[in-house]
Amino acid sequence: MQVQARDNVLIPIPVRVLQSVKETPDSITLTLDLRLNHKPGQFMQISVMGVGEAPISIASWGGNSTTLHIRQVGNVTGALGNCRAGDTVFVRGPYGNGFPMDETWKQSLILVGGGCGVAPLRGVIQHILRHRADYGEVAAFLGFRSPAELIFQSDIERWRKSISLNVSFDAMQEACSIKATEGFVTELLRQTEVPLERTTAFLCGPPIMMSIASDILREKGLPEEKLYLSMERLMYCGAGECCHCMIGGHYACVDGPVFRWNEIKEHVRE
Amino acid sequence: MPTYTLEKSDLVPFIASLARRYYKVYAPVRSDVVRLQEVGSGENIDLTENTYLPPKDLFFGKRDVLFTFDGPAMALPLDTVGSRVLFGLRRCDLNAIAHQDLLYMQQRRDPIYAARREATVLIGYHCPSAPSPYCFCGSMELKECQDLMLMERPDYFLVETGSEKGEKFIRSLPRYFLTTFERPTEDDRRTPGTDRLATRDIAALFGNKLWEEGAKKCLSCGACTTLCPTCYCYEIHDEVELGDLDRGVRCRYWSSCQLREFTRVAGDYSFRDDRIDRFRHRIYHQMQYFRDRYGVNLCTGCGRCISFCPTRIDWVDIVNRMVSHASAS
């Protein structure tokens, strides 16, 4: 199912905002009145008329609504920061390939997320929890800059009951209400023993974090083809046309945003 | 395909007749440069060189309105396209249209592009000699993708149809076209001196140091992508009315991969920040990435990106030198 208006993929449809939660000083989580059939790791194009459109990862899976976590760093995301329950936003999608939840069925998973890169992993974790017996060990590593930047706190507490969850903060000046370590999430990953047998890793975060985490996982012995990275690029169409999201010859919008490490290893930091 | 003749002395009344039958007729006319312009008769048609600008804008507009909005209400623009004839297009530009068709007609039917494309008859003019020293269409395996193709003869044009649309066009104008048994020769399908590019397979040349030579001269001005008949990248922005920020239009505009902004995300991070990455990306997209996906080189060898580059970066020459260095060593 694809949400779009008429016969033109570039035209969004209006949806109602059911809930708007200010997660951190500069980010917001919107729950939209939209039931989607999508894969974790796919994304939507969300618009504010008069401002523009931005691609945002879907931070949920299943259920009657769709969750988007939006950090206010640009024009469109800045305008979305003012969104309240009852407002109308415009969306189209879902786009992209998503994480390979089918290929990893019955396998163990390592999830590494940094900052708002945790958002698409929330969908992955919701999918795993729904089918918990069908996945092996699941070890998640979630890193944030500081306790003030923590997102999905109540979810994280709940997830601990079902999966192995490790949270780190780059710096911990403020008091922190959840169990976490201080330092980069990549260091936490390096020091923690992870499953490697029949294991796949999903990474989503800043390019430098994904690059280092990839190196660590390969050093630990995870094969290259078991490493998946969710890449961020500027994009307009979502349909493999506008070319802004090209990584070499790959389009992040239709071939990605999730790529196998060996498909794009030259371009991770590009 | 059947062939016909069109007398050169009939060109002026022929175009005038088209101008009466079709909503618009475009043909190459010399003003400051040769441009594809709307014409009422054939008097000013200039076939001595290719048009400075490609015909791309007539299908994939520099700015196309996707929809209008007024608060939460949206409306599609009423974009009715009258029937049109484009006269005198070269094979490079005709192939470029065919390559854009792969995206905007076949991969996905873009309603704006498709409406314009379907309302248009394409009449080609085969280059008897290379219109520019930078042409390299002879290296690009071009196909016949016009509705009609005119080939140069002393007193007439030999006309070959290339589509059902072209056949119908000929039948609708019987007084100008005479059936002939003359067939185009091999020479009619190529232009001498245009086989300039040593290889279309540049995959192994990605790390070659000579790319630096082009990048060093590149001003990142975007002239190459603007004048390219095939470049199909776009960006989407909203334009609001002054005085009422709730009302406006969402538009699609041409975009250029040669600009830093092309890959810049919030936080001012640009994924192809170095000029060489942008310079090389365009050529790899034209020569390799598009072919990997759609089975044909995007580039059609018109040479505009070289002849109108302000610093005259001849990337064809750069590739040729990479190839000759490789075979020499």
Image (tube, rainbow, N blue to C red):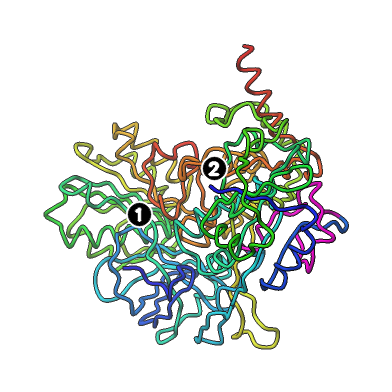
* Residues indicated by labels 1 and 2 sit on the same polypeptide chain: yes
- Provide the chain ID for the residue under circle 2: A
- Indicate the secondary structure of the residue bearing disc 1: loop
Please report the residue visible at 15 percent of the width from the left and 47 percent of the height from the top.
A106
Please report the residue visible at 70 percent of the width from the left and 49 percent of the height from the top.
B125
| Amino acid type at mark 2 | Glu
Mark 1 Cα shell of 10 Å, populated few (<14), some (14-19), many (≥20) = many
Q: Residue A97, labelled with which disc?
A: 1
Q: CA distance from mark 1 to mark 2?
A: 21 Å
Q: Quadrant of residue A253?
A: bottom left
State the residue position of label 2.
A270
- Provide the chain ID for the residue under circle 1: A
| Amino acid type at mark 1 | Asn
Magenta stretch containing residue A209, yes or no? Answer: no
Position of residue B17 in the picture relative to residue A174 (left or right): right
Q: Which residues are magenta?
A: B33-60
**Closer to the camera: disc 1 or disc 2?**
1
In the rendered image, the vertical position of residue B70 relative to residue B316, given as above or below:
below
Please report the residue visible at 23 percent of the width from the left and 47 percent of the height from the top.
A103
- Indicate the secondary structure of the residue bearing disc 2: loop
Q: Residue A235: where, in percent of width, then height?
A: 52, 59
In the picture as drawn, the residue positioned furthest to the top comes out as B329
Magenta stretch containing residue B43, yes or no? Answer: yes
